[in-house]
Image (tube, rainbow, N blue to C red):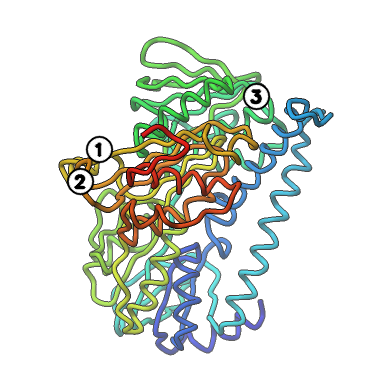
Amino acid sequence: MRSWQLREMEVADSTADLVILGGGSGGYACALRAAELGRSVVLVEKDKLGGTCLHRGCIPTKALLHAAEVADAAREGDQIGVKSSLAGIDMVGVNSYKDGVVGRLYKGLQSLVSSRGISYVPGSGTYVADGPGGGAVVVDGQRYLGRHVVLATGSYARTLPGLEIGGRIITSDQALTLDEVPERVVVLGGGVIGVEFASVWRSFGADVTVVEALPRLVPNEDEFASKQLERAFRRRKIKAKTRVRFTGATQNDTGVTVTLESGETLGGDLLLVAVGRGPNTAGHGYEEAGVRMNRGFVLTDERLRTNLPNVYAVGDIVPGLQLAHRGFQQGIFVAEEVAGLNPPVIDEAGIPRVTYCEPEVASVGLTEAQARARYGEVQTLVYDLAGNGKSQILRTAGAVKLVKAGAKGTSGPVVGVHMVGARVGELIGEAQLIYNWDACAEDVAPLIHAHPTQTEALGEAHLALAGKPLHTHG
């Protein structure tokens, strides 16, 4: 840390090429790429490098989901002739495993930032729009001047007006540090965060009810994916109440009671509030400096420029998908933009999306409804994983859905790929290439997929869409 502090003092009275406010996925990716391109960089972070993704989001939640997968495998071993059973869940051990993963990645990230000559400034920063170029970030009274400034302050767990977080009413932040498995949980919100925690707790043995005001779970996904997931959750005995509004919650020493608009009440040991994430922009000086905003989000053009000269914004504070890999790529984009490399504009629809519950939901491109709105006529094809050998081995149910632009019998690109099933998140790499390269089914059909793998399901789906179905009815 001492060497970072020395570099901090060296840069304090000079102007850096980039001053980046926020060291999460978008901020640190921007810093690393800019330093790689020979730019001087100051990186300001009030908490820990890696931000929400590394410490309170993607990495720790996926560690819990892997522990849940192991628990399910132990519980279900007899079904495949393996004499195993689940004796219980040791949350101290689970948390130790989870924290170990986070700690190793955090240490590696610290080493990367230090080795690239990036001036790291710990502390809460405020943006001010005076000074050369993009302005400055002020930390504890010290100004860090930048020819360009990148705003990357991330997001926070939203709650609802009048609902106080504390005790038995928690957000995902507190859910990651529980020292015991609850017996009964109510999850408020059926989006990505809600269904992932619902999946973990069910695998750990809890009774789980998900409450979602919208008509279906994972409502941002294609309706096909929602139906597949809801069916799978019913098989797992995860209860889902959709089209139901939450009206209040009360708690005492023994539990929490949730009241719905219908008058129904639900009891549990915990209420997880998983109603999305809000932009972490308050208190950083954005509005005072004149940054154009809307409902707390920083508005940018397609090249991630704000309305102020030489000021950019990346990650969860920019309207759109709140995904770590989106922020990561935006950070790289801005570093290359500042360096004059003129990188191609990021297509938001081309960003892969994965919900890591059991079964997983993975998609890229347009939903069927979005494609019909854009193209008028579309063709869809659903390939059931029952026809895939590896899926049978894994004992998973699900399907792959393709959405093609244009009517049946015409040639057109595949503009949407939607998948539900165990481990389908691992298939999204090929799927995003298909979408982003404007591939047609006829382009993918001749490609050879290793057997037996679940990637064959993508190949078979494209064979069928190209009019050459093998393990499916045309």
Residue 147 image-quadrant placement:
bottom left
Outermost right residue: 83
| Side (left or right) of 462 relative to 71 | left
Amino acid carrying mark 3 in the image: Ala
Spatial separation of the CA atoms under disc 1 and disc 2? 14 Å
Q: Amino acid at mark 1?
A: Ala
Measured as percent of width and height from the top left, residue 396 is found at: 58, 33
CB under 8 Å between discs 1 and 2 = no
User: Which residue is found at the position 51% from the left and 35% from the top?
Assistant: 385
Q: Which residue is mark 2?
A: 406
Viewer-side label of 1, 2? 2
Image location of residue 281, percent across then percent down: 37, 56
The crowd level at tag 3 (other Cα within 10 Å; few <14, some 14-19, many 20+) is some
Residue furthest out toward the top = 263
- Which residue lies under the disc numbered 3? 206
In primary-sequence order, the first of circles 1 and 2 is 1
